Every structure is written in structure tokens, then in C-alpha cells.
Image: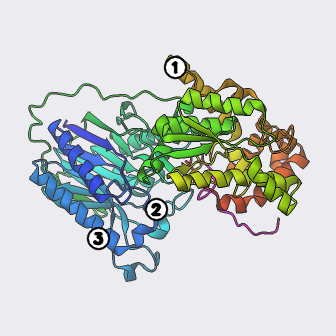
């Protein structure tokens, strides 16, 4: 039985940065070749970054992809690593748009995996199942594939699939099972969600049993707009045993020796709908190379550590990939701004994080001292800009009272942050959490001002939970807890009027988050939520607040998606409808 040495390159591509992405593919392949790899694979759309959205409909972009892909193949051959097959995810096109109008008037490309060898593209697999749910819109921008692809290399048959292809019953997996592959390689661009890691492994184990062969699951890593790809690539045996696992939230190449069954195709076409490409004998030194030790098994992270790392990576890549030198945020002494500041420091370092304390006439002494304490713990710059001298003349001239006066305070704070952003080049972080965003508990053009929302998809109760986890994580390392205890334990308040607390106008957060999860994530009706034990009037009020706040959410900054149902592309509802 052949031993196939597989290199799974879990990379963080920059969308549209062909020079950087192609250099990474070439350099990683050469390194894997030096370690005796028979086959090297990269993730879904690793050439371009993912998702490319409507760039898939631009012919010039697609032609540039193909040119770059061919240049990679040529360079690998020129640098002595052309003998082994290399799998690269890319958009394959432009296709004949006129012939595809019956499918989609905009689709002129496939979501594909190219097989490179000997300086050329020797095979292309096109993704069959195009997801059209959650954050995905591939059915509109891609054309589906029809054929399975098997790579005959080193006496083994390696079948290819792309992400959604293994999530659907039947389809390419059923066709692959019929040809009795030696192994199945799946390249993915699978975004992080809470608990999703626990779903992937059982799915892949079922597919390994179905095709009676080892399965390698290769995922992207990195942040792209509001998505975070967590990596966590892994390999399972035909019996479903975990053989190797990459780290989450970091670039990592798994190198693993897999004992696989002999080829059934022998490099020849095996039947209709299955394309077999001949990819040679593997690494030229495979007969004499020393065996690898058992595959690395990266430690499994706790769920709170996964969430924290996802939020950190999402912010870091948004800042870095968009060229921001620093971030700025308001520090109120409350839990939300404290967690956002701690995330920012973990993402880009304290020297690039700037805090602004903006006390009003209603700000408590502990809010100011808690903000200063936070800044000292994190080692970040903090300045104080009192808002009263700016609020008073506008409030007086416009005769603002009650809610209008409260909102003015928030908007003055937004003006200060945006002014400093313009003057000094910072990215403004807005600190609203998912619970507040859900019910509209924020001031449009006030505390909602900002270019990135780190905890936009984090419910209030989870904000507290993450704060406690981050402090305990620091203590276990012998470090100072970054978040002041008083910020965690004191009643939350916007401090826009004397003695104000959030629960003056909102239900207790434990109850509120449960109702919101039922309504937003699980799409339960008011009747069903009441049946869970909640007061009918409260449920109806919460649902009304959610529905009536869609207009605010449409104007809000993006932030990392960590849940099954994040606001934005996950949940698309009209602003105007009769409630």
C-alpha cells in the first residue's frame, strides 16, 4: 500500500493581492517539496482570497487569476519543485456568458481547484454545490461543476472536492465513492461560528466512512471583512481516527504520511463523469526519505478562547489589510469598551491603540477611574475630552430635552472620535454589542459611529463571559488581568442622565439575550417564546424593538461574525414593512 506524504497549507491570503498570494504559494510549496511532500494543497480561493463576491463577474479579474496561476506553475518548475502536483483554489473563467444565461445572467466563472505540475495546469475541478444561504451568494456569481476529478499520483488516487460539496448528500461524494479513491482531499473556505468546529469533524468522519478512505480537510485562515476563517485543518483515517490537526487562527502547514489503498484507476479514465489526471510518481526521493513522526495534533481550544481568538484575528486583519496604522475608541469605564480595548491590544499591540475618555456632567467618578485603570492595565494612551462645553451651546440653542438631549451627548462623543480619526489617521472602533444592536439601544451617528465593530456579534452576556475568561487567562500566565473588576461587576449604564442604568428601559440581560436568541437565531414566533416562560408583553416589546431597529443596523459598521445568525448578510429583512 502506498504511503502518500501530503502537505496541507493553511494560509491567510489577502484578497486581490496576487503578488503576495502567489509568492506564498510558491515558497510554501518549495518548503514542502524540500520535506519530501508528494502533493501540496492550498485552500479554497487561496490564489485570490475569499469570498471574492462580484469580482467573480469581472472578466479582467478572472483573466488576471489565470495568468497568475500559470506563472506560479512556471516558477515552481523553474525552481525545481515542478514534479509534484500542487492544488490551488481559484476562480476559473471567464466562461462563455451567453451559454450560461439560463443558469445565471452574471455567472461567468467556476469556483475551482487547479492541479499544477511540470509548469502547467494539468487538471481543474469545479465546485458542484454552490451555497446560497447565510453569508454565501455563490449561486448568483458562479456556475456549478459537473465532473469529479481524481489525481493519480505515486500509485494512489486522490479525489478532490470543494467545501460545500461534502456538506450535501449525494453529488460528488457519491460519485467519488464509486471510484474507490485512495484518499479524498477537500479544500475549504469555511468561516468560523461558535460550535461549528464540533460539526465539521463528525461530518468528515462520515464522509471517510462513505468513501472508505482517509479524508484531508483543508481550511483557510484569516479575517476578510466581517468573516473570520479559523483554519483548524485536519486529516482523518478511513475509520474516522484523527491523524493530524492544524492550529486554529494561525497559518500552519500540516505534513502527514498517509497509508492509502492502491490506485483503482491506474491513471486511466474510470467512467463517465469522473476525470482522471496523471500526476506522476510523487517526490523523487520518496523511496529513501525518512518516515515522518505521527501527525501533529494541535490542542483543541476552549469555546471562549476560540471566540476571543476569532475576534482578535478579525480585527487584526481588518486593520492590517486595509492599511490602518492605529485604532481609537471611547473609554467609558464600562464592560463593552473595556473588552473592545483589550481585543485591540491583543490584535495590534498597545502602542497602536488610543483611548478617549469623554465625561459628561452625568459621568460617575468610577467611570473615569475605571477607564484610567483599564488604560494603565493595557498600557495604552488615554486622553480626556470633556463633552459638557460642546453639549451646552447646542442644547441651549435647540432647546433639547429628554431623549434629544441624551442623544446629543452621544453624538458629540461621535464627533470627537471622528475628528481625532481624521486628524490623526486612526480607525474608529464602535463598541456596541449584539444585544444593544438588536434592540436599537444605541444612538445613530453617536455611539454607533465607527469603521469597525469588534463585538457586533457578541451578546451582552457573552461580553461579560469573555471578559472573565480573558482576565483568568492572563492570571494563569502570571500577568495582570487586563479588564478592571469594577467594569465587569457594576450595573451597565449609558450615563446620559442622573442615576441611569440599562435596566431602566431593557429587561435583565440574561432574559433579553435568551429572547433574542430564540427570535433572531431560531426564528421562533412570539407565541413560541412566551411558551418558553417569558412574559407576553415583554416578548412583544422586544420583538417590536428588534423589527423597528433594522434601519439602524443597515447603517452600522461591520464586525466579526461568530454566530450562526449574525446581523447583515445572515439576516436580510426589509426596513419598511407593516408590523
Residue stretch in magenta: 565-578
* Residue 525 placement (x, y as % from top left): 79, 53
Viewer-side residue, 578 vs 524:
578
Q: Which mark is residue 98?
A: none
Q: Residue at x 58, y 23 (%)?
A: 481
Q: Nearer the viewer, mark 2 or mark 1?
A: 1
Is 497 on the left or on the right of 38, as rendered? right
Q: Quadrant of the N terminus?
A: top left
Label 2 vs label 1: CA separation?
Answer: 47 Å
Q: Is residue 486 visible to us here? A: yes
Residue lying at the far bottom in this picture: please name it. Answer: 98
In the structure shown, which secondary structural element does the residue marked by tag 3 occupy?
helix
Which residue is under mark 3?
63
| Residue 263 is one of the magenta-drawn residues | no
- Can residue 448 be seen here? The reply is no
Residue 246 spot, x, y in % from top left: 37, 35
The dot on residue 479 is 1
To which residue does mark 2 refer? 130
Q: Is residue 290 left or right of residue 342?
A: left
Magenta span has 572? yes
Q: Is residue 208 above or below residue 93?
A: above
Q: CA distance from mark 3 to mark 2?
A: 22 Å
Label pair 3/2, CB-CB below 8 angstroms: no
Note whether 43 is above or below 198 in the view shown: below
Amino acid at each position: 500500500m502506498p504511503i502518500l506524504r501530503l502537505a496541507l497549507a493553511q494560509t491567510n491570503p489577502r484578497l486581490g493581492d496576487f503578488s503576495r498570494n502567489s509568492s506564498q504559494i510558491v515558497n510554501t510549496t518549495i518548503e514542502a517539496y524540500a520535506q519530501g511532500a508528494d502533493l501540496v494543497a492550498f485552500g479554497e480561493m487561496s490564489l485570490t482570497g475569499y469570498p471574492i463576491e462580484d469580482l467573480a463577474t469581472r472578466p479582467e479579474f478572472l483573466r488576471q487569476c489565470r495568468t497568475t496561476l500559470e506563472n506560479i506553475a512556471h516558477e515552481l518548475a523553474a525552481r525545481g519543485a515542478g514534479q509534484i502536483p500542487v492544488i490551488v483554489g481559484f476562480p476559473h473563467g471567464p466562461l462563455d456568458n451567453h451559454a450560461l444565461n439560463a443558469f445565471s445572467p452574471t455567472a461567468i466563472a467556476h469556483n475551482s481547484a487547479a492541479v499544477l505540475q511540470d509548469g502547467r495546469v494539468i487538471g481543474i475541478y469545479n465546485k458542484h454545490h454552490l451555497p446560497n444561504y447565510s453569508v454565501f451568494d455563490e449561486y448568483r456569481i458562479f456556475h456549478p461543476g459537473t465532473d469529479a476529478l481524481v489525481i493519480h499520483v505515486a500509485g494512489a488516487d486522490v479525489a478532490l472536492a470543494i467545501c460545500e460539496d461534502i456538506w450535501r448528500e449525494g453529488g460528488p461524494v457519491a460519485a467519488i465513492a464509486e471510484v474507490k479513491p485512495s484518499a479524498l482531499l477537500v479544500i475549504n473556505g469555511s468561516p468560523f461560528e461558535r460550535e461549528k468546529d464540533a460539526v465539521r469533524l463528525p461530518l468528515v468522519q462520515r464522509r471517510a466512512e462513505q468513501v472508505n478512505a482517509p479524508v484531508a480537510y483543508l481550511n483557510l485562515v484569516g479575517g476578510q471583512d466581517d468573516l473570520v476563517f479559523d483554519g483548524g485543518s485536519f486529516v482523518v483515517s478511513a475509520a474516522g481516527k484523527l491523524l493530524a490537526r492544524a492550529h486554529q487562527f494561525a497559518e500552519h502547514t500540516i505534513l502527514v504520511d498517509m497509508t492509502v489503498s492502491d490506485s483503482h484507476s491506474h491513471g486511466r479514465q474510470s467512467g463517465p463523469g469522473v476525470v482522471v489526471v496523471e500526476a506522476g510518481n510523487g517526490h523523487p526521493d520518496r523511496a529513501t526519505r525518512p518516515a515522518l513522526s505521527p501527525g501533529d495534533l494541535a490542542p483543541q481550544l476552549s469555546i471562549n478562547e476560540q471566540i476571543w481568538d476569532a475576534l482578535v484575528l478579525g480585527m487584526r486583519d481588518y486593520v492590517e489589510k486595509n492599511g490602518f496604522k492605529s485604532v481609537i475608541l471611547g473609554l467609558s469605564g464600562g464592560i463593552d469598551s473595556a473588552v473592545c480595548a483589550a481585543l485591540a491590544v491583543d490584535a495590534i499591540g498597545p502602542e497602536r491603540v488610543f483611548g478617549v475618555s469623554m465625561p459628561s456632567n452625568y459621568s460617575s467618578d468610577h467611570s473615569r477611574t475605571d477607564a484610567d485603570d483599564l488604560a494603565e492595565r493595557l498600557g495604552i494612551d488615554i486622553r480626556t475630552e470633556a463633552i459638557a462645553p460642546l453639549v451646552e451651546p447646542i442644547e441651549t440653542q435647540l432647546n433639547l430635552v429628554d431623549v434629544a438631549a441624551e442623544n446629543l451627548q452621544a453624538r458629540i462623543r461621535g464627533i470627537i472620535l471622528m475628528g481625532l480619526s481624521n486628524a490623526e489617521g486612526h480607525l474608529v472602533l464602535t463598541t456596541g454589542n449584539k444585544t444593544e444592536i438588536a434592540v436599537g439601544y444605541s444612538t445613530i451617528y453617536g455611539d454607533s459611529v465607527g469603521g469597525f465593530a469588534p463585538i457586533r456579534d457578541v451578546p451582552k452576556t457573552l461580553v461579560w463571559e469573555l471578559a472573565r475568561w480573558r482576565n483568568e487567562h492572563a492570571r494563569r500566565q502570571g500577568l495582570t488581568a487586563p479588564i478592571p473588576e469594577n467594569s465587569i461587576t457594576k450595573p451597565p449604564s449609558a450615563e446620559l442622565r442622573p442615576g441611569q442604568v440599562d435596566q431602566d428601559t431593557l429587561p435583565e440581560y440574561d432574559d433579553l439575550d435568551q429572547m433574542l436568541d430564540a427570535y433572531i437565531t431560531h426564528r421562533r414566533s412570539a407565541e413560541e417564546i412566551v411558551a418558553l416562560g417569558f412574559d407576553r408583553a415583554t416578548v412583544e416589546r422586544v420583538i417590536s424593538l428588534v423589527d423597528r431597529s433594522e434601519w439602524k443596523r443597515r447603517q452600522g459598521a461591520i464586525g466579526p461574525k461568530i454566530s450562526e445568525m449574525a446581523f447583515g448578510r445572515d439576516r436580510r429583512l426589509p426596513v419598511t414593512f407593516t408590523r
